[in-house]
């Protein structure tokens, strides 16, 4: 039996919201018994886009788009929280909230640490993404969100099949779980999740101009890496979380310089580094 899962390549996500719209198109006003009742037109986002803004420097803000749906956890908190077996996990790994047994169990909406379960006031039931299980049962190869992604960000398939695209991508792209601290063993993996970041800008002191093409070497317990400043003197690295680092700067005709840096868990902005002759 397949164990369905998803790999989301965030380097490809352009924030077009097609996946969110496709989910609405498929489920709003449509009941798919015995899997789910209709999704309300407003307030529910069984597939949503989290926009994470990070100020990598005063002039450089990067937006990461993170698609979020039910993570189809192997150790699902919602199953533990459910009364009288109202939430169950199918043989293919898809977690289903029974739309009959779960009626009135409002606590289910609060049981998901990912915020992927919603309360339908009209139907008096908790609801969430089903990986479009009704389509898969009807022979479809993937859910609507995956089908409509124009950037190829989303891949779906059998995680237990080493030849499947999702299994290969999960390995090749070092895909990880979103919020691994929840320890729920999700079937959704993310490649390109935002990492701790270090950046700064180099200035030639004598000319009082931004220093282009300066060699910048980063030394951490994880190893040594090198980059060069761009035309505006900017440099940046993705860095290990919580580590200390040494930065070395070298440019022809200028004295080499080293900086000791304590890395923050998200973004470290070093500011201006001045090189003198």
Image: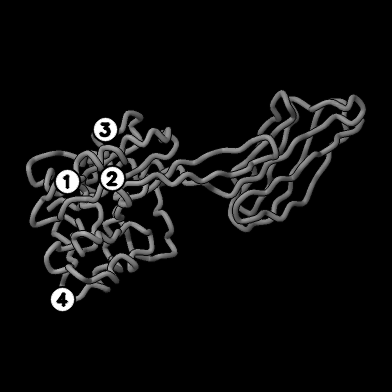
Give the foreground label among 3 and 1.
1
Check contact, mark 2 vs mark 1: CB within 8 A: no
Give the foreground label among 1 and 4.
1
Looking at the image, which residue is at 45% across and 41% down? 65
Q: Is residue 244 left or right of residue 93?
A: right
Vertical arrangement, residue 174 with respect to residue 252, above or below? below
First in sequence: mark 2 or mark 1?
Answer: 1
Give the foreground label among 2 and 4.
4
Residue designated by label 1: 29
Looking at the image, which residue is at 51% across and 46% down? 52
Q: Nearer the viewer, residue 253 or 238?
A: 238
First in sequence: mark 2 or mark 3?
Answer: 3
Residue designated by label 4: 84
First in sequence: mark 4 or mark 3?
Answer: 4
Classed neighbour count for the residue bearing mark 2: other residues with Cα under 10 Å, few (<14), some (14–19), many (≥20): many
The quarter of the image holding the C terminus is top right
Vertical arrangement, residue 230 with respect to residue 240, above or below? above
First in sequence: mark 2 or mark 4?
Answer: 4
Tell me the distance, in whole angstroms, between the alpha carbons under discs 2 and 1. Answer: 34 Å
* Residue 91 placement: quadrant: bottom left
Residue designated by label 2: 167
* Residue 37 placement: quadrant: bottom left
């Amino acid at each position: 039996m397949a164990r369905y899962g998803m790999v989301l390549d965030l380097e490809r996500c352009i924030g077009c919201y097609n996946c969110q719209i496709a989910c609405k198109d498929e489920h709003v006003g449509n009941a798919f018994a015995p899997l789910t009742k209709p999704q309300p037109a407003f307030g529910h986002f069984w597939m949503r886009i989290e926009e994470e803004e990070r100020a990598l420097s005063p002039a450089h803000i990067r937006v990461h788009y993170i698609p979020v749906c039910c993570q189809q956890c192997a150790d699902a908190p919602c199953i533990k929280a459910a009364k009288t077996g109202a939430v169950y996990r199918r043989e293919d790994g898809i977690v289903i909230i029974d739309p009959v047994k779960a009626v009135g169990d409002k606590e289910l909406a609060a049981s998901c640490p990912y915020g992927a379960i919603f309360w339908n006031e009209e139907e008096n039931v908790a609801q969430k993404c089903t990986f479009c299980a009704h389509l898969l049962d009807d022979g479809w190869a993937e859910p609507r969100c995956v089908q409509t992604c124009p950037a190829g960000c989303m891949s779906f398939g059998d995680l237990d099949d080493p030849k499947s695209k999702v299994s290969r991508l999960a390995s090749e792209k070092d895909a990880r779980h979103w919020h691994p601290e929840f320890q729920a063993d999700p079937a959704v993996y993310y490649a390109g999740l935002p990492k701790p970041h270090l950046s700064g800008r180099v200035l030639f002191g004598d000319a009082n101009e931004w220093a282009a093409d300066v060699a910048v070497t980063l030394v951490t317990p994880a190893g040594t890496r090198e980059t060069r400043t761009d035309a505006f003197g900017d440099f940046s690295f993705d860095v290990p979380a919580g580590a200390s680092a040494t930065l070395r700067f070298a440019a022809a005709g200028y004295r080499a310089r080293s900086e000791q840096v304590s890395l923050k868990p998200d973004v470290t902005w070093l500011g201006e580094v001045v090189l003198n002759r």
